[in-house]
Image (cartoon, rainbow, N blue to C red):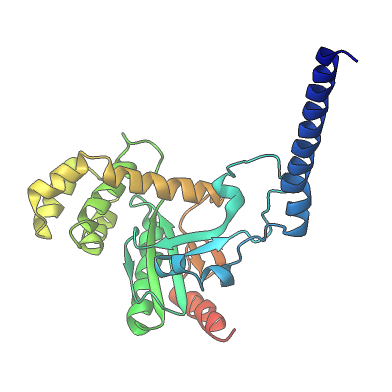
């Protein structure tokens, strides 16, 4: 047999063997390994025991799993969460280790929200070690509206540790949320004026509001006020007695 022909046959064998090895490797990595060691969805209980939980609580969708090992898909937020994302990014009253987390999705133009939130604040003051109350912005998703601008003003006040003072005045002026109201309120609650004005003109506070809107949309929230008491969802205005009953039920679980 000619040497060139022998060389060609050797090259072909090498290519065939290489292809076989590569195919076996791909089958192992993408099919056998995922079947032997399937991805396990993160549950809320597991998340509360890991390092992330020190910074926040995440109501993870424990039924979510991407089954196709050949695809790397970034899931939508709506596919990943079943409840609010609780972190230090949002204004809150109460201890981080509270047994009850009450999250309110609200808008400063909403008078019903204001009344319900005052009920929650009263209960939180009665049970300060048991309840953590978290504010979430869900204004009109348009940065030119008074609703959105008020949410930004609230975040800028929060930057100086005066969110709740600002929020009180914003709710009271819910039908007249103007730059003049923001300015007058910032002076009334002793905010640093330069810091406040710079914040209003920056993207930092705006992005925090947008994050809340994305979260609310992912949870398919269609109306406000909307509250989560731990993982229980409650839509609409709720009075003091109703809140207390729900809280007591959560405590007795």
Residue plotted at (57% across, 60% down): 60
Q: In the image, residue 12 lies at what x, y percent?
A: 82, 23
Q: Is residue 83 left or right of residue 3?
A: left
Left or right side of 15 for 239: left
Residue 187 in sight here:
yes
Q: Compared with residue 180, is residue 237 higher up or lower down, i.e. above or below?
A: below
Q: Residue at x 37, y 36 (%)?
A: 142
Marks counted in the figure total 0
Image position, residue 160 (x, y; %): 17, 59
Q: Is residue 236 visible?
A: no
Judging depth in this view, the residue of 65 and 134 nearest the camera is 65
Residue closest to the eye, 32 or 219: 32
What x and y, as percent, mark residue 42? Answer: 60, 62
Quadrant into which the C terminus falls:
bottom right
Which of 52 and 15 lies nearest the eye of the viewer? 15
Outermost residue to the right: 1
Picture residue at 59% right of the left edge, 44% below the top: 75
Percent x, y of residue 204: 27, 45
Left or right of 1? Residue 80 is left
Picture layout, residue 34 above or below residue 251 = above
Q: Quadrant of the N terminus?
A: top right
**Eyeballing the image, is 239 above or below 33?**
below
What residue is drawn where x is 81% and y is 35%?
A: 20
Q: Residue furthest bottom?
A: 252
């Amino acid at each position: 047999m000619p040497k060139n022909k022998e060389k060609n046959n050797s090259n072909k064998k090498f290519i065939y063997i290489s292809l076989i090895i590569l195919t076996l490797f791909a089958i192992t990595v993408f099919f056998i390994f995922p079947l032997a060691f399937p991805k396990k969805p993160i549950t809320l209980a597991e998340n509360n025991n890991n390092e992330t939980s020190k910074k926040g609580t995440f109501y993870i969708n424990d039924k979510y799993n991407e089954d196709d090992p050949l695809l790397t898909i970034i899931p939508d937020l709506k596919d990943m969460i079943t409840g609010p994302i609780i972190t230090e990014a949002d204004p809150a009253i109460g201890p981080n280790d509270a047994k009850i987390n009450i999250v309110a999705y609200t808008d400063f133009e909403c008078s019903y929200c204001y009344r319900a939130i005052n009920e929650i604040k009263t209960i939180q003051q009665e049970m300060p070690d048991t309840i953590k109350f978290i504010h979430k912005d869900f204004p009109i998703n348009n940065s030119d509206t008074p609703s959105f601008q008020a949410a930004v003003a609230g975040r800028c006040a929060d930057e100086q540790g005066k969110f709740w003072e600002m929020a009180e005045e914003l709710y009271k002026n819910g039908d007249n949320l103007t730059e003049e109201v923001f300015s007058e309120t910032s002076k009334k609650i002793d905010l640093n004026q330069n810091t406040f004005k710079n914040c209003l003109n920056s993207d930092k506070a705006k992005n925090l509001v947008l994050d809340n809107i994305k979260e609310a949309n992912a949870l398919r929230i269609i109306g406000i006020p909307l509250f989560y008491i731990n993982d229980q969802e409650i839509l609409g205005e709720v009075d003091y007695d109703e809140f207390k009953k729900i809280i007591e039920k959560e405590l007795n679980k």
